[in-house]
Image (cartoon, rainbow, N blue to C red):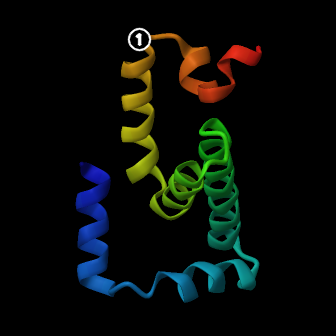
Amino acid sequence: MALIAYTVTVIGDHGLNLIPIFFGDIARGAWPGQFNADFMCFLMLSALWTAWRNGFTPSGCLLGVVALLGGAAFLLPYLLILSLRARGDVAVMLMGRHVGSR
């Protein structure tokens, strides 16, 4: 909830012009750009894992795109829901469709 409130505040103050700022910092080659590049790798990894976990089905790929664009606002509730559905079985939570092949 705090992340959502912070995001709404930033959008209210600065608008939705994130992309040029995000990639502009990377292009400048300074520490803010390094953080953005690191964060982008995390987003891509979470998107790839989400799609893989769901067997690269159309809905799984759509969830992957949501993970890429939504970041923690998507991943935190998604992991909470998965952990509740898996009833604490971390392998089921993390591997999804692939749990039977371990």
Which quarter of the picture shows residue 79? top left
Q: Observer-nearest residue: 25 or 65?
A: 65
Instruction: List the residue tagged with mark 1.
Output: 87
Judge whether 22 appears above or below 80 on screen.
Answer: below
> Could you say where residue 64 lies in the image, as x and y percent from the top left?
57, 54
> What secondary structure is found at the residue carrying circle 1?
loop
Q: Which quadrant of the rendered structure holds the C terminus?
A: top right
Judge whether 83 appears above or below 3 on screen.
Answer: above
- The residue sitting at 66% across, 18% down in the picture is 99
- The residue sitting at 45% across, 59% down in the picture is 70
Judge whether 23 appears above or below 56 on screen.
Answer: below
> Could you say where residue 84 lies in the image, as x and y percent from the top left?
36, 20
Judge whether 48 appears above or below 4 on screen.
Answer: above
Amino acid type indicated by mark 1: Arg
Q: Observer-nearest residue: 85 or 26?
A: 85
Q: Residues within 10 Å of mark 1 (few under 14, many from 20)?
A: few
- The residue sitting at 44% across, 28% down in the picture is 82
Which quarter of the picture shows residue 52? top right
